[in-house]
Image (cartoon, rainbow, N blue to C red):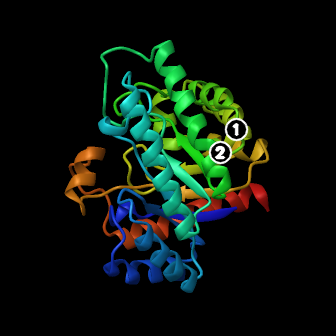
Amino acid sequence: MKYGINLLLWTDRMHDGLMPVLEQVKAMGYEGVEMPMFELNEPLYADWGKRLDGLALERTAVTIRGAGDNPISPSAGVRAAAVDAMKKTIDCCQAAGVSLLAGPTHSAIGEFSGAGPTEDEFKWGVETMQQVAEYAATAGVTIVTEYLNRFENYFLTSVDQTVAFVAAVDHPNVRMMYDTFHANIEEKDLTAAITAAMPWTKIVHISENDRSTPGQGHVAWDETFDAIKANDWNGWMVVEAFGLALPAIAAATKIWRKMYSTEEQLARDALAFMKEHVAKRWS
């Protein structure tokens, strides 16, 4: 197993002030970090790739799509913008030495039609992702698409929908993520959901029901880890937690109160929590 932490706990962009955080994360025992990739600046990410190499920290990345580059838009121009944005994001991944690009890249986050996904939207989403998939392959990047809960999107909100989407794209460089926060809201049977997801899953986000310290809420952690182990999965477990440090992230994730003492405490406790559960089952 590899252990990472999403840097959105501290920042939504890469900047010099992160160096002490990264050194601290490395000293704790994390093997990698998940970089925010919202600013499509290839030289910036090339520089950060070198810095992370110097710290011996591996990396994944996370990005999103918005209304202007929505992969399932009825507008062909907007869908073309989605392809362009994804290709630029993949270029940044290649520059930074990122091989796994996570996030809800299937549709625009926070955009709602007032209804569920249509057959046309599914077709447009698949076609858009197929246009990006081969480009990702040439860059050595796998797109790890993430379903979200019903309050953050309407297109993919379950394991079953996401597996169907990835299978329809039908490309080895498009896979999926399992996120314990979204699953806690949307899945009726976690064991069944995990069993269906694991053959397609490249990253597991370890995220508590309140987006705070994993292990201190009510996610069914024993069932979750048991099911992951039963499916013989081994890959990146990445902590995803949010706080109040960034107003834009707090607003997007609806975090209105502080639920941990410090970011350092959360990161340290989360790593110990993951390692304890894995040691019980994979030793």
Residue displayed at 36% across by 62% down: 9
Question: Which of the two labelled residues, at mark 2 and mark 1, occupies the earlier sequence position?
Answer: 2
Q: Nearer the viewer, residue 241 or 170?
A: 170
**Which residue is label 1 attached to?**
171
**Disc sitting over residue 155 in the figure:** none
**Neighbours of disc 2 within 10 Å: few (<14), some (14-19), many (20+):** some
**Neighbours of disc 1 within 10 Å: few (<14), some (14-19), many (20+):** some
Does residue 179 appear to the left or right of 69 in the view shown? right
Q: Quadrant of residue 36?
A: bottom left
Residue displayed at 45% across by 45% down: 84
Element at badge 1? loop
Q: Nearer the viewer, residue 178 or 146?
A: 146
Residue 69 image position (x, y, % from top left): 36, 38
Residue displayed at 70% across by 38% down: 171
Q: Nearer the viewer, mark 2 or mark 1?
A: 2
Instruction: Quarter of the image for the C terminus: give it.
Output: bottom right
Q: Quadrant of residue 161?
A: top right
Query: Marks 2 and 1: CB-CB under 8 Å?
Result: yes
From this view, report whether residue 50 is shown above or below residue 182. Answer: below
From this view, report whether residue 187 is shown above or below residue 84. Answer: above
- Residue 29 is at least partly visible in this image: yes
Residue 102 image position (x, y, % from top left): 52, 50
Does residue 170 appear to the left or right of 39 in the view shown? right
Q: Nearer the viewer, residue 193 or 235?
A: 235
Residue 261 image position (x, y, % from top left): 31, 67
Instruction: Using the numbered discs, state the Cα–Cα distance from disc 2 to disc 1 in whole angstroms.
Output: 8 Å
Does residue 64 appear to the left or right of 278 in the view shown? left
| Type of amino acid at the residue the image marks with label 2 | Glu
From this view, report whether residue 117 is shown above or below residue 130. Answer: above
